[in-house]
Structures are given as C-alpha cells and as structure tokens.
Amino acid sequence: MSSRVSGRGWAYFGAILGGAVSIAANVAHSYVPPTPPEGGPPVSADWTPQAGAVVGAIFWPVALFVAVEILARVAWPQGRRWSALRFGGLVPVATVAAIVSYKHLSGLLAFYGEDSLTATIGPLAVDGLMVMATGALLATGIRAHAAPAAETAPAPVAEVVPVAVAEVIKPASPAVPETTPAPVIEAASTPDPTPAPGPELDDRARRAAARKAYRDSGTAGTPLSGAALGRQFGMSDRWGRDRVNEVRAAAAKTAARRTTSAASAELPAAA
C-alpha cells in the first residue's frame, strides 16, 4: 500500500502553473509581428504566425514537464551510467526550455510596453518557480519510491521442518502394513525428562531437553524454529538451530536404517 508523500501536490501545482504561464507567453509571443529590417517594407496588417511557430512555442514547456515526470516516477537503477543518462537527458531539455521561455516572455513584456527592468527580471519568477517545482517533484519521487520498498520488505521466514523429517517424526500407526512400515524416530540416547530451563541445568542436560522439546513440537504438528528453541532455553538462535540440526540428522539416519532393513526383508531367502 503506497503512502502519500507530503508536498507532492504543491510541487505539481507549481509545475503546472509555471508550465501554463510559459506556454501562454510562448504562444502569445509567436503572434507578435516581427520587426521589419531597416529600410524594409512594414509587416502587413493581416500577418499571422505560421503553425509550426505556435506548435514549437507549446513544445518546450511540455517537453520539460514530461522529462521531469520520467525522471521522478521511474525507479532508476543505481550506478554512474544511469545517473549520467538521467541528468544528461534532463539538463539539455531544461536549459533549452528555460532560455526559450525567458526570451519569449521578456520580449512579450517589452512588446506590451513594460519597462526594461520588468522585462529583464520578470521572466525569472516563472523560471524560478519551474526550478523549485522540478526539484520538489524529484525529491518527493525519491521518497515515494522508498516508502513502498520499506512497506513491502520481506518478513523473516521461520524455519520449517522438511517434509521428509516431518514424516519421520510422526508416530507410527498400527494400521500400516508391515511391508511399508511408517518411519518412527528412535528415542534419544539421553531420554531425560524435559526439565524447566534454568541455570541448574548443565549443558548436556539442556541440549537433551531441547532436542526432546523439538521432537515433541514436531509430533504435535507445530515444529519450533531454531530461534524459538534457543529463546525457550535461554540460549542463542544458533544454539537452537544446532539442536534442530541434531534432531534432523538423527531422524535421517533412522529413516535410512529402516529403509535398508525393509529392503533386506523383501529379498528372497538364500537357498
């Protein structure tokens, strides 16, 4: 579930506002009659700009907005080559759009009769707004990519007893034919009762108790993980995993021994 990044709405509003002003100024400037050369004929009263000039006036701000969206929304891979590709493409588009927009808006203000200072610094407000909006979109885009990644981080996977071992530690059923005996785990070499874990247990007794607790949990159908077994006996996760591996190794040996015995029983008796 994606979270909403604060400030991204204002960044879009600023980019759209600056782009709209830039497009309007570019289109309006394309309708400004050209200044005739010195001594040349005046521009006719029915002069109109060519369609390509109007389309070109619209293209520059739109190209900048699309480039910023591509840069902000795509989860780009890490690396210098990708960074060079991203910003190497954005910088020319932003530079050309800023220069063209500035010249058109400045020329339009001068055509409308504004003083030279206003015509010089006025377009900087639009360019500054576009720069801030672009930076905000890039910053919030990075945060928007980081939020889902943190939310969907994989949870630690609990240890699961393999199917073969789970079958081994199931209790034998009397209804199973003798030709296919259900594998049953043999009693541990130190079948001590499970005492309550505590400082009074020596290391050997604690290990035996942990192995028995793991076998009991497998018989109940809810095998403990190595980490849970370690915590139950006040030991580390690795200590618990070692006890789980000991039980599994013993179960595998028992299964192999019973399989060999069953195969030998099926062989015909020697004459």
Image (tube, rainbow, N blue to C red):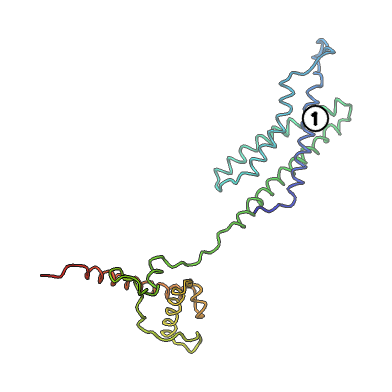
42 is higher (above) or lower (below) than 32:
above
Q: Position of residue 174 (x, y in %)?
A: 35, 75
On screen, residue 141 versus residue 103, left or right, reads left
Which residue is disc 1 drawn over?
25
The x, y position of residue 33, in whole percent, is: 81, 19
Q: Residue at x 41, y 86 (%)?
A: 192
Residue at 47% of width from left, 86% of height from top? 195
Q: Residue at x 85, y 13 (%)?
A: 45
The part of the image, by quadrant, that contains residue 124 is top right
Query: Could you tell me which residue is drawn at 86 percent across and 34 percent down?
Result: 118
In the displayed orientation, state which residue is furthest to the bottom.
200
Given residues 121 and 240, the one toward you in this image is 240
Q: Position of residue 248 (x, y in %)?
A: 38, 71
Q: Residue 209: which quarter of the image?
A: bottom left
Q: Please name whichever residue, 252 or 220, is drawn nearer the observer in this view of the structure.
A: 220
SS label for mark 1: helix
Q: Residue 7, percent across and down?
A: 75, 50
Neighbourhood count class around disc 1 (C-alpha, 10 Å): few under 14, some 14–19, many 20 upward? many
- Is residue 198 depicted above or below 127 in this figure? below
Q: How many marks?
A: 1
Amino acid tagged 1: Ala
The quadrant of the image that shows the C terminus is bottom left
In this rendering, the answer to whether 230 lies above or below 102 is below
**In the shown orientation, is residue 149 left or right of residue 180?**
right
Q: Quadrant of the N terminus?
A: bottom right
Question: Which residue, as the protein is rendered here, is positioned at the far left?
Answer: 271
